[in-house]
Each structure stands twice: as structure tokens, then as C-alpha cells.
Image (cartoon, rainbow, N blue to C red):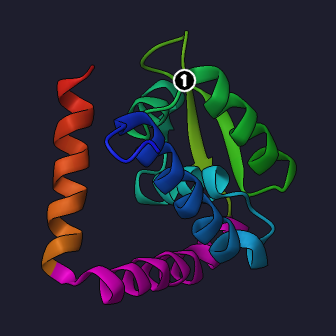
């Protein structure tokens, strides 16, 4: 019915991917957005909340809600930024650091399953094409 509809096809794909990553992060008690936020913080300890939201292409309020859950679980802390008083730095806790490898492995397993279905080259082309389209439509 909507075979040529960009919205329908990308939204349907997003729902499928959301389920895959939700399942991957479920053993950690994290939602998919929380899992990606935490992985971002683990890669860049002290990242400003605004930069983290921008890197993940989500709004600041969305980032705030997801980070509230990570703070409640004692996986990240918020600290005032010395460089910009309007911003806060997000730092991983020792508990988060202990999860880093397992989180990365869980995410890699999802990517590996998709690459197995699509093929390595098609997967890389798809990701590059989606990223290019997303940038062009900003």
C-alpha cells in the first residue's frame, strides 16, 4: 500500500530496530535510548549534555529524560561544566564502566545479525545512505 512512502518504510524499519536494540539492552535494565546514551558517555566521559543530545540526534528534553533514568540507576552523574555554566557534564560511574564491554558486545551482536541478513557491504551502504539522507533533510 505504501511501498514508495519514505515515511512509512523508515518508520517501520525504526520500529524493527528499536525492538532489536531494546532486547539487546534489556538484560542491563536499560531502554535502547538509555543504552546508546550510556555508550556515548562511556566513549566521552564528561561530555556536555547538549553535545550528547546533538550527537545522538535527539532533543535536549529527550536526553534529559533518558539521563534521569541513568542517574537513578547510578550509572552516570551530572556535574556543572566549568567551561559553560549553562551546561552540565555527564560522567560514567564505576558501575557504568563495569558494563561497557558487555554493552558494546550486545550492540555488536545486533549489528552482526543485521549484517548477516543484509551482507556487510549492503549494511554499510544502507547506514551511509540513511546518514546522508538525514543530513540532507535537516
Residue at 59% across, 71% down? 20
Is 106 one of the magenta-colored residues?
yes
Closest to the observer: 2 or 131? Answer: 2
Within the image, what quadrant is residue 27 found in? bottom right
Which quarter of the figure is the C terminus placed in? top left
Compared to residue 79, the image places residue 10 above or below, namely below
At mark 1, the secondary structure is: loop
Q: Position of residue 132 (x, y in %)?
A: 16, 40
Point out the residue furthest to the right here: 72
Residue at 55% across, 10% down? 86
For label 1, the residue is 59
Disc 1: CA contacts within 10 A as few (<14), some (14-19) or many (>=20)? few
Magenta: main secondary structure: helix
Please indicate, yes or no, whether residue 92 appears anywhere in the rendered image: no
Is 80 one of the magenta-colored residues?
no
Residue at 54% across, 11% down? 85
Closest to the observer: 125 or 39? Answer: 125
Compared to residue 16, the image places residue 1 above or below, namely above
Q: Using residue 27 as the reference point, say whether residue 81 is left or right of it.
A: left
Q: Using residue 67 as the reference point, say whether residue 129 is left or right of it.
A: left
Residue at 40% across, 77% down? 111
**Magenta stretch in the rendered image:** 94-120
Closest to the observer: 131 or 86? Answer: 131
Q: Position of residue 128 (x, y in %)?
A: 17, 54
Figure label count: 1
Amino acid at each position: 500500500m505504501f511501498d514508495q512512502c519514505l515515511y512509512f518504510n523508515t518508520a517501520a524499519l525504526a520500529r524493527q530496530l528499536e525492538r532489536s536494540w531494546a532486547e539487546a539492552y534489556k538484560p542491563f535494565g536499560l531502554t535502547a535510548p538509555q543504552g546508546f546514551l550510556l555508550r556515548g558517555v562511556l566513549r566521552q566521559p564528561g561530555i556536555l549534555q547538549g553535545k550528547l543530545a546533538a550527537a545522538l540526534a535527539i532533543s535536549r528534553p529527550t536526553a534529559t529524560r533518558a539521563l534521569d533514568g541513568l542517574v537513578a540507576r547510578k550509572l552516570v552523574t551530572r556535574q556543572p561544566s566549568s567551561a559553560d555554566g549553562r551546561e552540565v557534564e555527564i560522567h560514567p560511574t564505576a558501575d557504568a564502566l563495569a558494563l561497557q564491554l558487555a554493552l558494546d558486545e550486545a550492540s555488536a551482536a545486533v549489528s552482526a545479525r543485521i549484517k548477516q541478513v543484509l551482507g556487510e557491504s549492503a549494511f554499510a551502504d544502507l547506514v551511509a545512505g540513511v546518514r546522508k539522507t538525514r543530513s540532507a533533510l535537516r
